[in-house]
Amino acid sequence: MNQRGGWALIKSTWLSWMQHRSFFFLLAFMWMIPPLIYLFVWSTAAGGKTIGGFSRGEFVAYYLVLILVNQLTYSQTNWTVGDVIRSGQMNTLLLRPMLPLYDTLASEVAGKVVFMAFMIPVTAALALVLRPEMHVTLRNGLAFVPALGLAWALRFFWGYWLALLAFWATRADALLGLQDSLVFLLAGQVAPTALLPGLMREAATVLPFRYMLGFPVEVLTGQLNTVELWTGFTFQAGWLFVALLLFVTMWRTGVKRYSAVGG
Amino acid sequence: MEDRVEAQIIVRELCKVYRVPEREAGLRAAVRSLFRRRYRDVVAVDHISFTVQTGEVVGFIGPNGAGKTTTLKMLSGLLYPTAGQARVLGFVPWERKHDYLRRISMVLGNKSQMLWDIPPLDTFHVLGEIYHVTPAELKQTLDELVELLEMQELLTKPVRNFSLGERMKCELVAGLLYHPRVLFLDEPTLGLDVSMQGRLRRFLAEYNRHNDVTMILTSHYMADVVTLCPRVILIHHGRLLYDGELSALAERLAPFKLIRLTLSNERAEDEPQLPPGADVVEQESGRLTLRVARSEAPSITAHLLNTLPVADLAVEDPPVEAVIDQIYQEGDV
């Protein structure tokens, strides 16, 4: 572990990113559009009634939390890992006495700070206008923190091992696009998981995607009883273990195959 | 192994084979390759062996695709070899132990480790942290390097705005600020103008003299090799063709010398009487270039001085570029 170097990298990446903050603000705005659309669709559909137990205000609360959680767990850096391998820029990272993973983590942390500088005021303004209904209990508030952390780790490492396929196939990033689509469908963006039709709901419960995004939102908005909460944590931890295993295997075998492009 | 104890780089039968996909041109071949891919083995480095002692500067030369950079990448731990062994500073490079990476540096002329959007000083501080250099040590090293490379004014400008030469100076500082013991330089003067090339060469020579750092350098500019490397390793098609002094290589390949002489004005128009064994290569109003066998150069020179009104005379080796070109063309020494 090289924590000194890792921390310095985070600081410098953050400085570097702040040079282009308007670009990242626009990216953040782009990413919040799909959940915002579904916020309006569901809250309008609910009107004065409830749909599947959700009132208008609860849909608003669900989607506003989802917008923040999506932004916090989305690993935009996964997209650059494949480029770094393909273009040979990995050479520079492999020559340092530090795992190249640190470099990606530095971008991840730096990115979150820049994105949140935009997202928090925007979501707060939306909350003032749209009047969400949410009663956070102490249990849900406390459970949300590890659920969010695990969701980020799962989404990050799942994307990272897919990105590492670039050691073998030049356009492995297509799989990241597939991951994004599955998160969109099964992780509570199109609709809260509880409202998905039978087979899709079962798939969402078993597959890793809900645990990357929807699960922490459901925890905070109080949709889960104690059994569902612990089942969710078990799935989340289990899938994270699988993701880490795949990441370590891909990294070790991939780096031996690396052909250090150029020259 | 019989290598001397102080050998810092020991390479034995090192070999690298790349497996590259190939297909013929055209749509049909493209569709066929979707279902059945054909591969070809390309031998980039073919069982080469050598050792390098502490403080030596070795020029690694060969035509494009000879296997120079592949060898350097294996020695710096970027590539796993297909076969063979190597030890650098007692480490197996491709195990990429952090203790090893802290002791070596690889400067790639065509790749940058600088962060483009921030001034180089910020990147240097990050690298200082990554390599665990204390702030006081970092400041002292930076001051020295910045002075040697005359780049004080660059430290606070974003790297994005630098010229190639300015960026290369930064790459060198980045590669040296943690005092590596072994330096791999891959085309460090690539694309630089003549005066910048000269300045970097002087810097590297001085740095090697003061710090006793072991260097392996690849370059297509023979001036880099002639100025910096008393010893060259020449590879071609992945095979080691020559390992020794550059001057000895020239002697072996070009068993002749050139005598350039200028005759005094009053006799310049006459046809000079030349001794046997002196062939005229160039002749132009009183100036002559003669080619003579190495062994006969002293006697022919004496004869010329005694029999002709010589205003000026110089005995030279043929240009090193001509010698190297001969090897590249013939593929053998």
Image: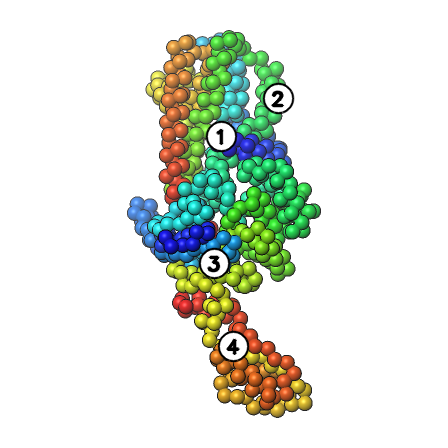
Mark 3 or mark 2: which is in front?
3
Residue B25, can we see it? no
Residue A134, can we see it? yes
On screen, residue B145 above or below A211 = below
> What amino acid is at disc 2?
Pro
* Mark 3 and mark 4 on one chain: yes
Cα distance between the residues tagged 2 and 4: 80 Å
Q: Residue at x 37, y 39 (%)?
A: A253
- Please state which of residues A71 and A122 is positioned toward the viewer in this rendering: A71
Q: Which residue is mark 2?
A: A121
Q: Residue at x 55, y 44 (%)?
A: B113
Mark 4 or mark 1: which is in front?
4
Q: Which residue is mark 1?
A: A75
- In which quadrant of the rendered view does residue A170 lie? top left
> What amino acid is at disc 3?
Phe
Q: Residue at x 40, y 32 (%)?
A: A247
**Cβ atoms under marks 4 and 1 closer than 8 Å:** no
**Cβ atoms under marks 2 and 1 closer than 8 Å:** no
Residue B117 percent location from the top left of the image: 61, 40
